[in-house]
Amino acid sequence: MSTAAELAVRGRAAAPTAAPGRFWYARMRAPHLWWRRLSGHTRQRSVFFQNAVRLALALAAARLIAGVDTLPHGFWMLLATLTLTRTTARQTRGTVRVALTGTLMGAVVVAVLLASVGTDTVVYAATLPPLMLIAFTLGPVKGVGWAQAMFTLVVALVFAQLAPATWRLAEFRLLDVLAGSAVGIVFGLLAWPRGAHDELRRSMALMLRCAAETVVATTAQVAVGGARTPSGTAPGHGSLQHALVMAEAAYAQYASEPAERKGPDAAQDWQATLISGHHVLWGADRLLVPPEPLVVPPLPREPAAAATRIGDRVAACMLLVSQRLDPGPDPPGAPVELRATAAGEVSRDPPGAPRLYYATAEWLGSLRADLERIVGPPSQARVEEPR
């Protein structure tokens, strides 16, 4: 925590960290970090990529419609598409409904104002500054309806000072917002309409599959021993870290979207799933990445067999939980309760077991406890366990 706080406050001027694995980004240049983020999210399963594609297609369609139909002040249509399109179709519809109501109210006020004042720009110039102060203060606080209503008033007063305007300016504003909202709704329905709700299950399942591979490879490497260096990483570290980033991004968007009233997503403990991935990632590094170079002897035969057997069972349970989160065409058969059998195997104390064996067994036992938290108590969730 102290290292993270120092990096947050001082940046690259902070002292060299004693845990480079956790803070790998601290010594990288900004262009390298930008490239890692760009290359990591340039794929279909990234929610950032999905949002960018959805919005880009909607803006392209809005620009095409505004250009073909020669809508007056057509950039208002693009602005409405940009500001009203949300990550889910349901959220976009709700936002558009409120925004159109606010725009209609603002357009009525604008029409009355322009018809009453006419071309007297002095009135518009005197009214604009306090109106902008009110609009940009109340808009973010009161919501999108108030924001659209106040913004309609602001742009009307601005354009009334640039050129003679009539009440039809309010009509054009309402028409552009309506067209932009329609484009946003259409592309919200066509491109990933449920936002992160579907992607979350896929990304969490993929993360658990990567974690299972890391568990098997780590226990195998602990059993055989070998040379260890501080600059190394556990097997599968990069793949699991990337899968965790994808899952965390999907969960962050999921938490910002309207919750489903019914369905398995509402009761699923997604934070427990993310925590299990972090436990696999950093626990494997603690076992295999020492603070200084050394050669680790292989485990004796019985401790090695016990560690490998427990690791295989934990990895198998992870695969079954991942299949439960994202069922494929061949779902598992009749489920049974997931029981913590790893602790029982550790308590047998294989003869000649060194401290590294117990550290590995403790790590695997904590992962099994994570899996039980993910699936919930036996009365709520059951999952098929490997025999």
Image (tube, helix red, strand yellow):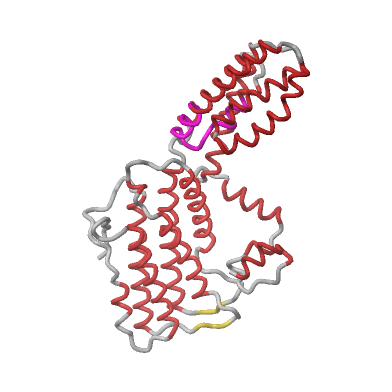
Q: Is residue 68 visible?
A: no
- Front residue of 201 and 11: 11
Residue 242 falls left or right of residue 126: left
The answer to whether 218 is drawn above or below residue 140 in the figure is below
Residue at (38%, 86%) from the top-left corner?
Answer: 353
> Is residue 92 located in the magenta-colored stretch of the structure?
yes
> Measured along the vertical axis of the image, is residue 129 above or below residue 370?
above
From the top left corner, tell me how far across and down residue 36 is, in percent.
63, 53
Q: Which residues are magenta?
A: 78-97
- The answer to whether residue 86 is magenta is yes
Judged left or right of residue 283, residue 324 is left
Mostly what secondary structure, the magenta segment? helix
Q: Position of residue 354 (x, y in %)?
A: 42, 86
| Front residue of this view, candidates 81 and 144 | 144
Residue depicted at x 45% and y 71%: 218
Residue 180 % position (x, y): 56, 24
Instruction: Write down the quadrant of residue 175 in the picture.
Output: top right
Quadrant of the drawing holding the C terminus = bottom left
Query: From this viewpoint, which residue is outermost toward the bottom?
Result: 352
Closer to the camera, 138 or 14? 138
- In percent of width and height, residue 241 lies at 52, 59
Can residue 197 be seen at all in this image of the molecule?
A: yes
Q: Is residue 83 left or right of residue 132?
A: left
Q: Residue at x 57, y 33 (%)?
A: 55
Q: How many marks?
A: 0
Q: Quadrant of the N terminus?
A: bottom right
Quarter of the figure with residue 73 = top right
Question: On screen, 361 above or below 247?
Answer: below
